[in-house]
Image (spheres, rainbow, N blue to C red):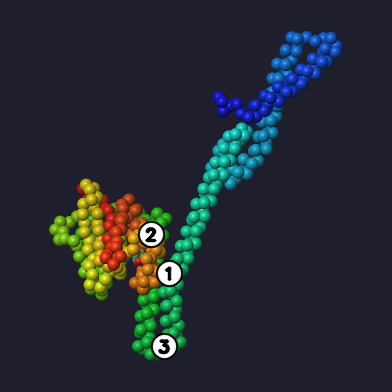
Amino acid sequence: MKNKITKSKFFSFFTALYVTLLQTLLLSVFLYLFSVLNVYFLCFWVVFSFIFSFVLIHYRLDKYIYNSIKNTYEELALIESTTFNSRLVNTDMASLKIEIDNYAKNKKLELEALKVREEYRKEFIGNVSHELKTPLFTVQGYISTLLEGAAEDPNIRDKYLKRAEKGVDRLIYIVKDLDMITKLEIGDLNLNLEAFDIIQLISNVYELLEIKANNKNISLVLDKNYLEPIMVIADQERIQQVLTNLVVNSIKYGHTNGTTEISVENLNSSKLIIRVTDNGEGIEAKHLTRLFERFYRVDKSGSRQEGGSGLGLSIVKHIIEVHEEKIYVESKLAVGSEFSFTLQKQN
Ligand code: ADP
C-alpha cells in the first residue's frame, strides 16, 4: 500500500492543496465584498475544488511523465528487449530509477565480462601465433634452402627433409592440442562414459610410450602387481589422453635412468585416486598454482626444446573437470613430481 503512494501523487496532492487554498481565499474575499459569504458554500467549494484539482493535476502529470518516458522505454527496449519489452511503461519515478540502476549495473557487468573475454582472446591469439611461428619458420627455412640448391646433395637433402618433417609434426601436434582445448573450453566435448579396467589402460599407455621412455632409459612401472582388474566409469579415450599427457611429461622432465610410477588406490567408497609419480627435475613451489594454465611453462625455452605446446596440463585439467573429478600436483625441485586425479569407481 505504501508503495502505491507514489511521489507524483504527493506532488499532485500538495499542488491541489495550494490551488484550493488560493482559490478559496480569493473566492472568500470576492463573496465578502459582495456580502454573500456563506460558510457551507465555502466548505463545499474547498472539497470540490481540491478533488477536481487533484484529479486533473495528477492525470496531466502522469500523462506528461508517461509521454516523456515512453520514448526512452521504447529506445531501451530496442537495445535490451529482455528487461524492458515485456513491461508496461512505469510512471513512478522511484521504481523507474531502480529499473534504470539495475539496467546500468547489468550493462556494467556485461561490459566487464566482455573486456575479460577480449583480453583472453588477444592473449590466446598472441600465444597461438607465437607457438606456430617457430616450427613454421623452421620448415620454411629448410624448404627454401633445398630449393636454392641444397637438394642436389642427397645427404643434405635427406637431413633437411627430415628436419622439415619434424617441424610439420610439431605444427600438427600444436594444432591438435589447440583443437582439443577449444573443444573443451566451448563445452563441445561429449563424454562417452563407460566401465573399463584402469590397470589395462595404464598398461596400454605404457606400451605406447615405451620407445619414448627407452630413449631416456626411463622405467615405466606400476607401484605393485595388480592381479585383479580395477573398473572405473569414465570416458576411456579422454582418460587415456590424461594418462598419456602425464606420462609424456614425466619422461620429458624426467632424468635419464629415472622412473615413472603409477599407483591406483581407493580414496573412499566411490572414488579412486590415480597417482603418476616421477623422480625428475621437479617444479618450484611458486609455479604450482599456475601450472594448469594454458601455455604456462616453468622454463620457457627448456620445455620448448622438449617439444611441448604448454597446453598438455590444461587439457588434462579440463578433461578431469568435465568428469567432475579433481586433479592435484605435488612437486619438489630436483626431487620429482606427483600428479594425481580422482575417478569414479564402478561399484
Ligand atoms: P608442455 O607442453 O610445456 O609440457 P604442459 O602443460 O604439459 O606443457 O606442462 C606445463 C609445464 O609444467 C611444463 O612446461 C613443465 O615446465 C612443467 N611440468 C609438467 N609436468 C612436469 C613434470 N612431470 N616434471 C617437471 N615439470 C613438469
Q: Position of residue 346 (x, y in %)?
A: 22, 50
- Quadrant in which residue 66 is drawn: top right
Of 303 and 118, nearer the camera is 303
Residue at image x 83%, y 15%? Answer: 30
Residue at image x 67%, y 24%? Answer: 13
Q: Which residue is mark 1?
A: 131
Is the C-beta separation of discs 2 and 3 under 8 Å? no
Give the CA distance from mark 2 to mark 3: 45 Å
Q: Is residue 274 left or right of residue 44?
A: left
Give the number of the mark in front: 2 or 1: 2
Of 201 and 266, nearer the camera is 266
Badge 2 or badge 3: first in the primary sequence: 3
Q: Amino acid at mark 3?
A: Ala
Give the number of the mark in front: 2 or 3: 2
Q: Which mark is residue 209?
A: none
Q: Is residue 208 above or below residue 1?
A: below
Q: Residues within 10 Å of mark 1 (few under 14, many from 20)?
A: many
Q: Which residue is mark 3?
A: 150
Q: Which residue is mark 2?
A: 290
Residue at image x 45%, y 72%? Answer: 133
